[in-house]
Image: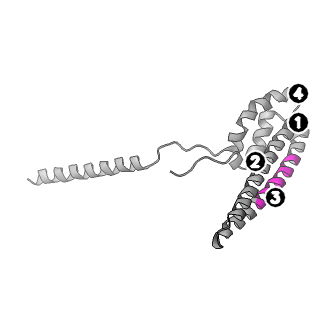
Amino acid sequence: MQKTTLISAVAVGLLVSNLALVAHVLRTDNRTPHPPPPMHQPGGPRNLIIERLHFDEQQVVAYQQLIDQHRAAVLAGDKRILQLKTELYTSLSAPADSIRTDSLAAAIANEQRHMEEVHYHHFADIKKLCHPDQLTYFNELAPELAQLFGPPLHRPR
């Protein structure tokens, strides 16, 4: 009788551990993790552009100047957007003013539009750096720019 009780206890233990494992697997997101886009790796976008477009030393120097200008413009735009958002959300503590809220939302949208133009012109300037034989490489890269340099799309469920 003791042998039967021991075997039953082991069987119940195995059943419980298997059920716990199945529950864990079902609750866990089983997608394989994707490497972060190049923009989120040190030197990622810079090195990717240089490599994919086969830039020479002079082009790399000119490209670095474009990067510095682009970063300054993006930083200024991000700062302005943050100021507008802070003003918008601070207005929640005051009596409702739909005209002011709409005005701030429109200003944020306008600043976002401006930021997209900054990004677009940055890539157009990069294209201007290309020699004629590099334009094919640029044209192959162009459709990927939004995915390569956009924000990561990994959102929690």
Dot 4 crowding, Cα within 10 Å, few <14, some 14–19, many 20+: few
Residue 114 among those drawn in magenta:
no
- Look at the numbered disc 2 and give the secondary structure of its residue: loop
Q: CA distance from mark 3 to mark 4?
A: 33 Å
- Look at the numbered disc 1 and give the secondary structure of its residue: helix
CB within 8 Å, label 1 to label 3: no
Q: Which mark is residue 132?
A: 4
> Could you tell which of marks 1 and 3 lies nearer the N-terminus?
3
Residue 41 percent location from the top left of the image? 69, 48
Indicate the amino acid at tag 4: Pro
> Could you tell which of marks 3 and 4 lies nearer the N-terminus?
3
> Could you tell which of marks 1 and 2 lies nearer the N-terminus?
2
Name the foreground residue: 4 vs 52.
52
- Look at the numbered disc 3 and give the secondary structure of its residue: helix
Q: Nearer the viewer, mark 3 or mark 4?
A: 3
Q: CA distance from mark 3 to mark 2?
A: 21 Å
Q: CA distance from mark 4 to mark 1?
A: 10 Å
Q: How is the structure coloured here?
A: one colour
**Which residue occupies 73% across, 53% down?**
109
Q: CA distance from mark 2 to mark 4?
A: 26 Å
Q: Which residue is mark 2?
A: 43
Name the foreground residue: 105 vs 27.
105
- Look at the numbered disc 4 and give the secondary structure of its residue: helix
